[in-house]
Image (spheres, rainbow, N blue to C red):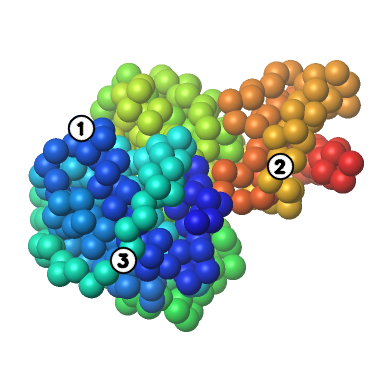
């Protein structure tokens, strides 16, 4: 068994290379053993899967593995990941398995596991790996004990109750939805149609070959079709979902992007209008503008580690109302369940635009002007990532090169200077370092980026 597929937040690998039917069977069986060890006794687990070509085969093997431990499988069918989480709050079950590799290339697949109402991550995922390594039983052709559940109906009914009042508004913004041929487009499109909107649908039908573009709406080149649709149809904005529907991208009418941290700020502003003491969480990659603005509005905002499972855990600890990541994961506990659901996020966005006739582009133009980079990813061997970061931190602390004001080390190193800030952190899923910079001027940004990249490059090459 290749343990490299067991990552910080999920299990992910290449189909028929390090994940196959035998692996999937053991995963299902190990998860059943894990649930019983942790005291979950309902012996019912929901299993859903995304649009990938291998998902159906994996589903069968996982189901046989669960059944071998006396656990009934509730078959959710082809769904986005957030609806797997939704099942935890709607069905009488011990946990869920979502078969997905999110926005990875089509040859990948994997698993996101939840026990109770919480997703497994870190050491919990490694416990599953340890259990799997001790399983000697192999996959057979056992008869499946499954019950099909129309979870999409539960989901659409739930959203209709919360957002159904929007049907009565005469004004409705015009927008497009790009599903990227993933598992969320067709669901989101139908939900908006149910509510009386007329979205233009792009690539909303699931297709595991992803024939039109890669299903990652946080990469600008994947938003070209959405930009064209907005321009050609004179739309107000466009919405993109990633491959499994837990991340969102938003394009405005001028073709610019409303990034994940800006979405967090927008939602926070409207939550604070009705809840003055609201609490928010943002990951270390988010702009200083977001932290300062929320504090100015009277909200409490906490900076935390990047990673959807880590953010959800922190939200629960702080009883936060909303959290967000630069990567497009947005988590609503305000009026929702506290997990990342791009369809729900898009509904909250359209709700604001509808109720308040808000022009999203005008809103963005009123933000303080800063200059920043997107994520910069630098290859770094897995065994060198942490040492590079620690040595960089020592350099920051000892040299006057950056004129450091403060250092935050909850996730890598985020350092602030008089001109701006920089971030160097280790990816939890790949052998790369992730960097981001922000400053008050373009020259200051270039200077900050150039100095940091030079030092990091030298540390990696030593």
Which residue is located at x 33 percent, y 63 percent?
138
Query: Marks 1 and 2, how far apart in space?
Result: 36 Å
Q: Is residue 79 above or below residue 54?
A: above
Q: Is residue 223 above or below residue 442?
A: below
The residue indicated by pointer 2 is 383
From the image, which quarter does the C terminus lie in?
top right
Quadrant location of residue 181?
bottom left
Disc 1, SS = loop
Q: Is residue 329 left or right of residue 171?
A: right
On the image, the x and y values in percent for residue 151 come to 15, 59
Q: Is residue 453 left or right of residue 330?
A: right
Q: Is residue 172 visible?
A: no
On the image, the x and y values in percent for residue 407 come to 69, 21
Circles 1, 2 touching at the beta carbon (< 8 Å): no
The residue indicated by pointer 1 is 39
Eye-nearest disc, 3 or 1: 3
Disc 3, SS = loop
Q: Is residue 298 above or below residue 159?
A: above
Which residue is located at x 27 percent, y 44 percent?
33
On the image, the x and y values in percent for residue 60 come to 26, 68
């Amino acid at each position: 068994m290749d343990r490299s597929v067991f990552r910080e937040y999920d299990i992910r690998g290449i189909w028929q290379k390090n994940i196959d039917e035998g692996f999937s069977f053991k995963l299902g069986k190990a998860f059943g053993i894990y649930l019983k060890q942790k005291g979950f006794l309902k012996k019912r687990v929901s299993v859903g899967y995304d649009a990938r070509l291998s998902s159906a085969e994996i589903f069968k093997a996982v189901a046989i593995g669960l059944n071998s431990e006396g656990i009934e499988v509730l078959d959710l069918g082809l769904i986005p990941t957030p609806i797997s989480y939704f099942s935890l709050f709607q069905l009488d079950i011990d946990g869920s398995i979502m078969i997905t590799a999110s926005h990875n290339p089509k040859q990948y697949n994997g698993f996101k596991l939840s026990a109770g109402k919480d997703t497994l991550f870190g050491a919990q995922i490694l416990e599953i790996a340890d259990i799997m390594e001790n399983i000697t039983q192999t996959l057979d052709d056992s008869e499946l004990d499954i019950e099909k559940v129309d979870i999409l109906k539960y989901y659409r009914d739930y959203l209709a109750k919360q957002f159904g009042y929007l049907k009565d508004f005469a004004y409705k913004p015009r927008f497009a939805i790009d599903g990227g041929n993933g598992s969320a487009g067709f669901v989101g499109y139908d939900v908006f149609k149910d509510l009386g909107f007329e979205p233009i649908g792009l690539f909303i039908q699931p297709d595991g070959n992803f024939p039109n573009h890669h299903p990652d709406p946080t990469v600008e080149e994947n938003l070209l079709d959405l930009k064209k649709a907005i321009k050609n149809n004179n739309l107000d904005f466009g919405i993109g979902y990633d491959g499994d529907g837990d991340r969102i991208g938003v394009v405005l009418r001028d073709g610019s992007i409303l990034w994940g941290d800006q979405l967090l700020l927008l939602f926070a502003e409207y939550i604070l209008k009705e809840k003055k003491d609201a609490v928010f969480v943002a990951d270390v990659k988010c702009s200083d503008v977001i932290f300062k603005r929320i504090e100015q509005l009277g909200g409490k905002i906490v900076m935390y580690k990047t990673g959807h499972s880590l953010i959800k855990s922190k939200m629960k600890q702080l009883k936060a109302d909303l959290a967000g990541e630069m990567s497009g994961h947005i988590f609503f506990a305000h009026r929702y369940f506290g997990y990342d659901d791009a369809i729900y996020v898009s509904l909250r966005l359209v709700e604001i635009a509808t109720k308040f006739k808000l022009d999203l582009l005008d809103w963005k133009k009123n933000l303080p002007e800063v200059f920043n980079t997107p994520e910069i990813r630098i290859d770094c061997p897995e065994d060198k990532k942490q040492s590079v970061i620690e040595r960089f931190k020592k350099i920051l602390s000892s040299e006057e090169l950056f004129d450091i004001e403060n250092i935050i080390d909850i996730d890598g190193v985020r350092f602030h200077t008089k001109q701006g800030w920089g971030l160097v952190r280790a990816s939890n899923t790949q052998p790369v370092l992730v960097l981001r910079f922000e400053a008050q001027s373009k020259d200051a940004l270039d200077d900050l980026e150039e100095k940091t990249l030079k030092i990091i490059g030298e540390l990696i090459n030593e």
